[in-house]
Image (cartoon, rainbow, N blue to C red):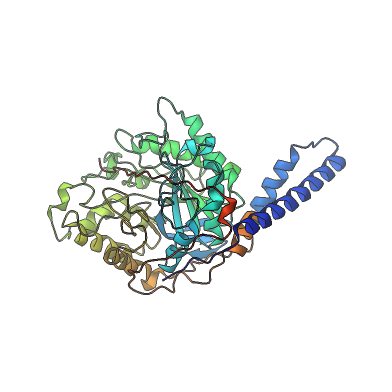
Amino acid sequence: MITHQQNTTCNKIAVKKNLQLFIKKSLVVFGLTSLIIGGISGFSSIASINNIKSQAASPSYTTSNKKFFRDGQEIVLKGVNWFGFETDNAVFHGLWTNRSANTQLDQMKSLGFNAIRVPVCPGVLTNKAIGGVDYSANPDLNGLNSQQALDLLMNKISAKGMYILLDHHRPDCNAISEYWYTSGYSETQWIGDLKSLATRYASNPNFVGIDIKNEPHGPVSWSEWKGATERAGQAILGVNPNIVIYTEGVSSTNAGGNCNSSYNAWWGGNIKGQLCDPISTAAIPANKLAFAPHVYGPDVYAQPYFNDTTFANMPAIWDDHFGSVQAAGNSVAFGEFGGKYGGGDPRDVAWQNKIVDYQIAKGMCSFFFWSWNPNSGDTGGILNDDWTTVSTAKYNNLKRLMDAPACQGGSVPSNSSSPASSIASSAANSVSSSPNSSSAGVSSSVSSSTPANSACYQVMTNRQMGGDNWYN
């Protein structure tokens, strides 16, 4: 059982503000000095100096030979999806309970997770009002808009020593689009938003990359998606060269030549085209590219190849869609996979057992499981509907992958180069548990306390549920 440590919220905020004020004053002095010496640099140089200093202090994330690295040291991303920022709530779901974000992050770490995929939509960048938050449990979110809430929670995740993968999930914050653009959202806007995210969080030391488009599907061809990936990836790396570009596949099975597939693919699930028509290394260097296909089982959609209830046919199908790309030396980490693991299609338990067996056998160790949230209609979550207890059987199956000997690369990030806001958060909310220290089986409730000095804040609660459909 993990108990959320109470802290003095008002004092924590004061510490953060003082640190930020000190850094801002220092940068102003530095910028004025540059102005005097250079004569023509101007005040606009301060922003450039800040960006350069931030990127210089941030680690470099890369990929090579099927693996992931931070400053040249291998890391294994054992992640979950925590959704909500891509919905009308414009903030993580589950904060409507009496559990704080810190408490949920502590629980993730105690279970061995060290990374979070954070779905977002462009509306988050427009300072939307957030909803569905119990401010008595999360007082530091009170009065914040969506962008400020994302800033705060990104820093909380980093301060806990966890990695962050941002995911551009829905262009209109409502439905998953086939293409990366729509009639109301252009490719130029898409790339602009990706660049904004890459720049805004460049100083966060645990920001590993951006999953540039959630689930391309429908008529989108590999050739079209490859070109879009190149354009977006090159633009992102132009403003933040320290992160990795994560790209998904397509649902189309027609990639041309030997890369055509005979098997239905999931939205974002088929990356086989990379073998015949690879993404240009001139646009995205090979060590800055990762593949994040999605794959699901019978709980999400009854594919015709699920008729073999032993799923003995599945490894060949998975090899066809993405395993062959990893075998060629590319780094592959599922951006989404999961299911109810009981209570849905009776075949799903065997399917999830089989996909974990496959990942272990292939050394496909890094992943982002869908989802932490229990309110995903087709899959459920790591948490049960009470947002507190763990779905034990589902988690224990996934933990076989997390504990596999081949998947024990260096996985705990160091926060020695954290930005000021992360340093303040870390000092107030430090945790000592290691991602590899959790027990084999977990099904315990996690208690939380109302933070001290909650009278500094107004209490408001709201709840909204949401989910996605993935199949084609």
Instruction: Please determine whether, in this image, residue 28 is positioned above or below residue 315.
Output: above
Q: Give how far across and how far down residue 298 sits, in percent.
A: 20, 52
- Which residue is more in the foreground, 14 or 123? 14
Q: Is residue 43 left or right of residue 360?
A: right
Q: Please indicate, yes or no, whether residue 349 appears anywhere in the rendered image.
A: yes
- Which residue is more in the foreground, 345 or 4? 4
Residue farthest to the top, as pictured: 183
Q: Give how far across and how far down residue 376 sits, in percent.
A: 31, 49
Which corner quadrant of the image does residue 179 belong to?
top left
Q: Give how far across and how far down residue 157 sits, in percent.
A: 52, 57
Residue at left offset 42%, top offset 50%: 96
Q: Give how far across and how far down residue 204 sits, in percent.
A: 59, 53
- Which residue is more in the foreground, 301 or 385? 385
Q: Is residue 288 left or right of residue 175?
A: right
Which part of the image, by quadrant, shows the N terminus? bottom left
Which part of the image, by quadrant, shows the C terminus? top left
How many numbered marks have been drawn onto this rendered protein structure?
0
Q: Please indicate, yes or no, whether residue 58 appears anywhere in the rendered image.
A: no
- Which residue is more in the foreground, 445 or 180? 445
